[in-house]
Amino acid sequence: MVRYVYDFTEGGREMAGLLGGKGSNLAEMTRLGLPVPPGFVITTDACRAFLTTGGEPAGMSREVSDHLKAVEKAAGRRLGQRDDPLLLSVRSGARFSMPGMMETILDIGLNDDSVLGLAKVSGSERFAWDSYRRLVQMFGSTVMGVDARLFERAMADLKDRRGARDDVHLDAGDLAGLVETYKTVIRRETGQDFPQSPAEQLRRAILAVFESWNGERARLYRRREHIPDDLGTAVSVQRMVFGNLGPDSGSGVAFTRDPATGRPGLYGDYLPNAQGEDVVAGIRNTVPLGELERLDPESYARLRAHMETLERHYRDLCDIEFTIERGTLWMLQTRVGKRTAEAAFALAAALADEGLITPDEGLARVSGDGLARLMFPRFDTSEHGDPLAHGLPASPGAAVGAAVFHSAEAVRRAAAGEKVVLVRQETNPDDLPGMIAAQAVLTSRGGKTSHAAVVARGMGKVCVCGAEELTVDTEARRFTAPDGTVVEEGTVISVDGSAGAVYPGSVPLADSAVMRFLETGGTDEGAAWVVDSVARALARADTVRRLEVRANADTPEDAARARRFGAQGIGLCRTEHMFLGERRKLVEEMILADSDVERERALAALLPLQRRDFAAILEAMDGLPVTIRLLDPPLHEFLPDRTDLAVRIAAAEARGDLPAAHDAELLTAVNRMHEENPMLGLRGVRLGLVVPGLVAMQVRAIGEAVAERLRAGGAPRAEIMVPLVGDVRELRIVRDEVRRVLAEVSEESGLLVDCPVGTMIELPRAALTAGRIAEEAEFFSFGTNDLTQTTWGFSRDDVEAEFFSAYLDKGVFPVSPFETIDRDGVGRLVTIAVAEGRAARPDLKIGVCGEHGGDPESVHFFHSAGLDYVSCSPFRVPVARLEAGRAAL
Ligand code: PEP
Ligand code: MG
C-alpha cells in the first residue's frame, strides 16, 4: 500500500524526493534532537496523484487524521479546541527550494469560537484576533481564490478610519471587525462562507498547496531554474508557534556563515514580536541577529549552538528560520543555504581546510555557471561621483539599466531590447517576471533574506536591497535619493550588487579580479580570498578530469588568451572567420569566379594570408594541437545580399545612372549561386569537391606554415579537419588530396610535414555511418551546432527568435537544444558515432567543437559519452575545465 504521510520523527534528509526539502529537513532536525514543533509531511506522491486525477488520493485523509491525532496527543489539546486550540501551519515544500512560489496557510484551527479560547490562554485578545484575521485573509485568497487586493484594501480603509499608521496600531476590536469584513468579502466574491470546521480548513489548505504547484509563478520559476514540472510538492503540517506574543517573542532568519562572501560568523536578521512571514516579506525593518544577544542572551546562545550542530551535521552552510515564543526557541526550517558564486568557492575551500569536507566534495559544490559569473566585469567607480544611495549587497555583480517600477513594465521594455533595473519598495512573488526581465533588482526595504535578495541570488541576478535612504514611489514611478535627486522611470542607473550601492547614470565596467587572475596569474590583496579559492577549485578539477579542454580560436590573440586560460590546444580554427571584414572580398571572388584563371588568381591571393595566419596561430599554440578546419562557408555568409544588390542597381537606374558594372556582374553571379537553404547547400566538404584547387590551396597554406614553424625550431601540431561530411567517400576524396599536397610540401621543404586528417561529425548520416567514416578519419569532432540543426530540422539562425519561447513555455524542452545538448536525440547520435567510430579505429581521437563544448551540463554528457576533449570559446575554457573535473567525480 502506498503511504502518503510521514511523521517528522519518521523521516530524514535522504527522503527529500518524497518529503520535499522543507519536510525532510524538519525530520532531520527532529532526528538531531533540535526543538522542532511537532508535525508531519504529506508526500510528493500524494501531490502527483492529486494533480493527475484531480481528486484526493485514496486513504490520504485517514492517514492525515491519524497523524493529526499524534500531534494533538503530544500537544495535549485538539485542533481548534474551543478553550485552548491547537493551531497548525500548512506549508509547501518541493524537492528543490522555490522561495515564495507556492502557498502557505497559517493559523489553521481558528474559528468564531476558538478565537475566544486563544484570546484567553494567550492572555492577548489582540493577538488572537490578529491571528484569526491572518487566517481568514490567507485562506480567502489562497484557498478560496479571492483577489488578495480586496483584503489589503479593507485593511487600508480601516487604518485610514482609525488614523493608524501601521497595523500594530489597530486594537482587538478593530481586528475583530476586520474579520467580519473579510468574511463578507469572501461571501460576496465566492458565494460561500469561510469554513468554521477546523478539519475542513486543514483538508482544503492541503489541497490548495498541491494546486499551487501548477500556479503561474511556480511554473515560471521552475522554467527559469530548470526544475522539472512533474516533481510535485510535499506539504508540511506543523503545530504553530508564535513569535508575535510580545516583546519576549520574535522571529528570525539566519545563516551559519555569510552567504554573500562565505566568510565565517553568524549572520542574519531578527524581528522582535513578529511572525516569520513578516521577516521575509520585508514589511518592517529587521535588526541584525547580534542584537538578539542583548535582547535574549539565553535564546541566542541556544540558537548559536543549534546552528553549529547543523553546520557540522550538514557539513555546509545552512540557513535557518526560527521563532522565539515567550522565551522558548523553536527551529522552523533549515536547508543548505543558497549562496553567491563567490561564497560557493570560498566555502568549498574553507570547509575543506576545516576538514569538514574533502577537496572533491568542495569541487562538487562549485559550478561552472558560478565561475562564469565571477568572470563578469565589475564597476570601475574611480572616475564616477558618489552613489545615490547605499543598500545591502544582496547579490553581487554590476548592472546598468533604466529604472522601472513595475514588473510588467520591466517585461515590456526588456522585450523591446532595453536593459532595465526593477525598483520596488519590496518584491513579492508576483514580481518574478519583472525580476527575470531586469538586469538588476533594487529595493528600499527588507534584509538580505528578503524575497528580492533570496530570489535574485538564486538567479545570479544583481540585487541591492534595503536601500532605506531611497523613497520609492511606485505609483508615481520614481524614487528620490537623500540628496534630493529624483529618478523618474526610464532614467539610467547603475547597481553594484557587490558593494551595495546605486549610482546615477551608467558607470563604466572594470575587469573582475577572477578574470584578471585567469588572464595574468596576478591578484591584489583585496581579492585574494575569492581568487585563491577559484584557483584551488580549478587545480583540483585539472587533477581529476579525464576530458581535455581545447578552445575554438581563429586568431593568434584568441589562441594566446585561450592558452592562458588553460586550453590544451585548439579544437576548432574556423578558417573562414579569418576572412570576415575586409578580407571577405577575397572569398567572394573565389566563390564567384567563373573561369579557372579567375579562380586561381583568387586562390593565389588567399594563400599567403592563410599561411601567415596559420603560422601565427601555430606559434601561439606551440607544442599543442591546432585543429584547422577547411573552409566551410555557407555561401550566404560571404556573398552580398541579393535584394540589397538589386535595390542598389534599381536605384542607380532610377537616377538615370548606369549601374556599376561590378554590381551587375555580381548580381548575375549571386543569382546563379542563390540557394533557398544555404545552410543545407554548397558548403563544407561539398565546396572542396566542386571548387577546383580550393582544398589544395588551404592544405598548402597549412603545410607551408608548419614547415615555417619547424624551421623556426617550433613544435607545430596542425590537424586538418573536413567539415559537413555525410559519407565516407566525400572524406576519402578530400583526404587523398590533402595527403598529396602535404607530400608536395614535404618534398619542396625537405622537412617531414605530416598532419592527421579527421572529420567533423555534424550530420545525422555521418553519425549513423561513423564506423565507415572512421576508416578514413584519424579523429572526429562533433559539430553539435549543425548536428542539432539537422537532427531537429531547426534552422539555427532563425528558431531562437521565432518560436523557441513558445516551445519553452509549453515545456517541449526546458532549455534550447542549441544551448544544452539534447541527450535523447542529438546525444544518442553522438553515442552511436563514438561506439561505431572506436570499434572501427580504437585509437580514434574524439572531441566536440559546437557551442555545447562550453555548456556545463553538456560537458557532463560528453564526459560520460567517452569523448577525449571538449572545445569551446576561450572565455568558457575555465568553465569547461571546472565542469570536466566535476563530471569526473
Ligand atoms: C558546429 O556545427 O557545431 C560547428 C562547430 O561548426 P559551425 O558552428 O562553424 O558550423
Ligand atoms: Mg558546423
Image (cartoon, grey):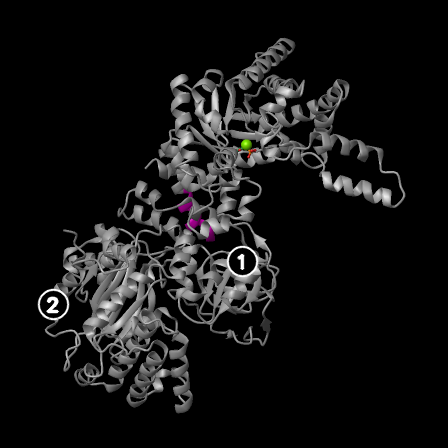
Q: How many marks?
A: 2
> Residue at (59%, 58%) from the top-left corner?
416
Q: Quadrant of the C terminus?
A: top left
Going from N to C along the chain, the mark reached first, 1 or 2, is 2
Residue 15 percent location from the top left of the image: 22, 51
User: Can you tell me which quadrant of the image ligand 1 is in?
Assistant: top right
Binning the other alpha carbons within 10 Å of mark 2 as few (below 14), some (14 to 19) or many (20 upward) gives some
Q: Which SS type dominates the magenta stretch?
A: helix
Mark number, residue 399: 1
Residue at mark 2: 69
In front: 626, or 377? 626
Residue 67, image x, y percentages: 14, 63
Magenta range: 526-535
Q: Residue at x 67, y 18 (%)?
A: 693
Against 419, residue 816 (above or below) is above
Label 1 packing within 10 angstroms: few (<14), some (14-19), many (20+)? many
Q: Is mark 1 within 8 Å of ligand 1?
A: no
Q: Is residue 884 visible?
A: no
| Location of residue 413 (image quadrant) | bottom right
Q: Is residue 740 left or right of residue 299?
A: right
**Secondary-structure class at tag 1:** strand
CB contact under 8 Å: marks 1 and 2: no
Is residue 166 visible in the rendered structure shown here? yes
Which residue does the image show at 16% across and 73% down from the upper left? 79
Please report the residue visible at 54 percent of the width from the left and 19 percent of the height from the top: 731
